[in-house]
Image (spheres, rainbow, N blue to C red):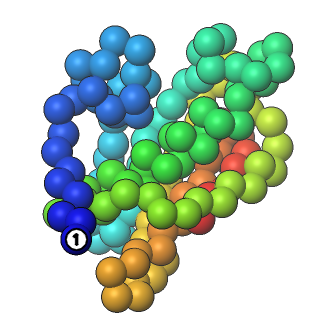
């Protein structure tokens, strides 16, 4: 028999951990009335894949972080069981991304969340579920 996973925050999270010297140190704004979470992130050169184009895995990490943190801040710590990311257009190093996540549905113990990353012009660069 397996014991339940115990989730604790030691501030070393790659996405939001304040003590992680290599982390992104994402900061979040909660919109309680709409049950959404927002964050802005400006990718640096070390976050690229091709020259000056942000690595898709980094964008996926940020979107996953938002979806997970929304649940954490609602008092429902969770882990990602499955995630899909659709990359719509390139994001560029040094250009800020505004990211947002929300809960789309609950089915028993499973929560479905969605997230989007937009560039400064408001165009979607990636969507995650």
User: On screen, 27 above or below 42?
Assistant: below
Residue, far front: 1
Measured from the top left, where is residue 113 in percent x and y? 48, 68
Q: Please indicate, yes or no, whether residue 73 appears anywhere in the rendered image.
A: no
Image-based side of 71 in relation to 48, left or right:
left
Measured from the top left, where is residue 89 in percent x and y? 82, 43
Quadrant housing residue 55: top right
Measured from the top left, where is residue 125 in percent x and y? 73, 46
Residue at 32% across / 32% down in the picture? 13
Tell me the quadrant of the picture where the C terminus can be found: bottom right
Q: Along the line of sight, which residue is nearer the eye, 92 or 75?
A: 75
How many dots with numbers? 1
Residue at 65% across / 11% down in the picture? 45
- Residue at the spot of label 1: 1
Measured from the top left, where is residue 4 in percent x and y? 20, 64
Tell me the quadrant of the picture where the N terminus can be found: bottom left
Residue at 47% across / 74% down in the picture? 112
User: On screen, 77 above or below 118?
Assistant: below
Image-based side of 99 in relation to 70, left or right:
right
Helix or strand or loop: what does disc 1 sit on? Answer: loop
Residue at 71% across / 37% down in the picture? 56
User: On screen, 27 above or below 37?
Assistant: above
Q: Along the line of sight, which residue is nearer the eye, 102 or 14?
A: 14
Q: Please indicate, yes or no, whether residue 34 appears anywhere in the rendered image.
A: yes
Quadrant housing residue 70: bottom left
Image-based side of 78 in relation to 75, left or right:
right
Circle 1 packing at 10 Å, graded few (<14), some (14-19), many (20+), is few
């Amino acid at each position: 028999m397996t014991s339940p996973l115990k989730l604790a925050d030691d501030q070393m999270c790659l996405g939001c951990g304040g003590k992680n010297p290599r982390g992104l140190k994402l900061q979040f704004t909660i919109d309680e009335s709409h049950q959404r979470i927002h964050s802005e992130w400006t990718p640096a050169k070390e976050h690229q894949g091709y020259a000056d184009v942000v690595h898709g895995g980094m964008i996926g990490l940020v979107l996953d972080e938002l979806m997970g943190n929304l649940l954490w801040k609602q008092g429902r710590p969770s882990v990602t069981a499955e995630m899909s990311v659709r990359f719509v257009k390139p994001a560029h190093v040094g250009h800020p991304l505004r990211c947002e996540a929300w809960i789309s549905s609950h089915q028993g113990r499973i929560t479905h969340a969605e997230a989007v990353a937009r560039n400064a012009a408001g165009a979607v660069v990636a969507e995650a579920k």
